[in-house]
Amino acid sequence: RDLAAAMGNRSGRARGSGADGALEGGAGGAAARSGALAGAAAVRPLHQGAVTAACSCGGDGGVATGGKDRLVVLSQVALVETAAAAATAGAGAAGGATGVTCSGHGNEVTALHWAGPSPAAPLFSASRDKLVKQWDLGTGREVQSFSGHSLAVTGLATTGDGAAVVAGSRSGTLIRWDVGTGAVLREAHVSRNVVTSLVRIPSTELLLQGSEDKMLRIWDAATLGVVHTFPRGQYFHTCCDAAEDGKTLLTGSNGFNGSGCLVAVWDRRKLDSPVERRPGHLQGLAACAFIPGGASGGGGARGLRYCTSATDGTVKLWRVREDAAEAAVDLQAPGAAQAMAVWHDGRGGGGVVVGGVSGAVAVLRAAEGLERVGHIRPA
């Protein structure tokens, strides 16, 4: 795989020099596993400035992060875990973490989307520069740029066949482009629909979208018509996700000092009210995502697991229809959990990477709780 090969080349150099792309806080690996912030002062940021976007990318263990530094960085979580194991065993830090860096945006990266599951599928990024860009995972080269938005682009998704990319912006507009030609295929506008998040619902051509107008909408990706509008909430929706079953949806809202800060699970077949809605954090949610493992055998939402991150610097692991969070990690710094993405280990497990205002990116494994693995270190 192109991304894995790029990471492997870097990890070889790291093993030789001991200085390139390793787990931060080497001997602190054991403390990291206990949930404490290991070697916080020694953590080098992956981005120069806040991490503002993240997504799974390039196959098992691959992730992409974007930041205020206008860069997109591709990383390999498996190499961080290798370094963590070596550090815990007293062998020091080993293995690289970062692979390819993509540059070309003129402003902060606001959203990322990988059109997987094929490892060769392209990566797309959106920015405050009003553009969407497509990247080659193997080289970091910009393949093409999509224009048409008048304000910052804040939501990204692709169609099921990967032939079209759809992006929403703070102007309330969604645009669909042909990936092959770069041509605009459709455009739709809803007044006050300040897009905060956008995700395709698996096994469908439907898009779930959050907005600052306190509305949630489901769009037809082909026609860019709104097919469902949820009941208006009290707080605006900051993030959303859809489970692989194509039936279970997840949304998070803003809030302050424990007021609002809600996470909700929805059944797409009955959208008049959520399956569950609960206060998630003390401050507004920054990201939410379903994670590997835990699905029920009956085809319903029960047992599905998901993670949430919030601007109070906490990350929580939940299970649908359980009374309380299974686990929580406090990154011990406000704004440390602004962006979050799921990673998969290829064995049915995985976890999340979380980045924040410092530019650091933490790696957490979701097993029987949330286990802190380490940080992705810059090359």
Image (spheres, rainbow, N blue to C red):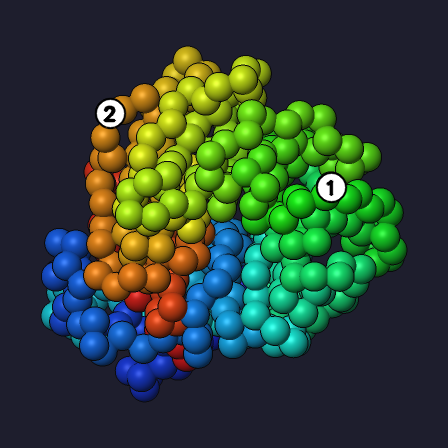
What residue is drawn where x is 38% and y is 62%?
A: 355
**Crowding near pointer 2: few (<14 within 10 Å), some, many (20+)?**
few
Q: CA distance from mark 1 to mark 2?
A: 37 Å
- Say what secondary structure mark 2 lies in: loop
The residue type indicated by label 1 comes to Val
Give x and y (percent) for residue 30: 12, 61
Quadrant housing the C terminus: bottom left
What residue is drawn where x is 13% and y is 65%?
A: 89
Give x and y (percent) for residue 287: 43, 48
Residue 283 appears in view: yes
**Crowding near pointer 1: few (<14 within 10 Å), some, many (20+)?**
few
Kindly indicate the quadrant of the structure image that contains residue 327: top left
Q: Mark 1 touching mark 2, by CB under 8 A? A: no
Mark 1 lies on residue? 190
Drawn side of residue 356 relative to residue 128, left or right = left
Mark 2 lies on residue? 323
Of 283 and 299, the residue lying toward us: 283
Give x and y (percent) for residue 88: 15, 64
Give x and y (percent) for residue 295: 39, 26
Quadrant housing the N terminus: bottom right
- Say what secondary structure mark 1 lies in: loop
Drawn side of residue 270 relative to residue 356, left or right = right
Give the vertical position of 69 relative to 163 (above or below): below
Frontmost of labels 1 and 2 is 1
What residue is drawn where x is 47% and y is 34%?
A: 234
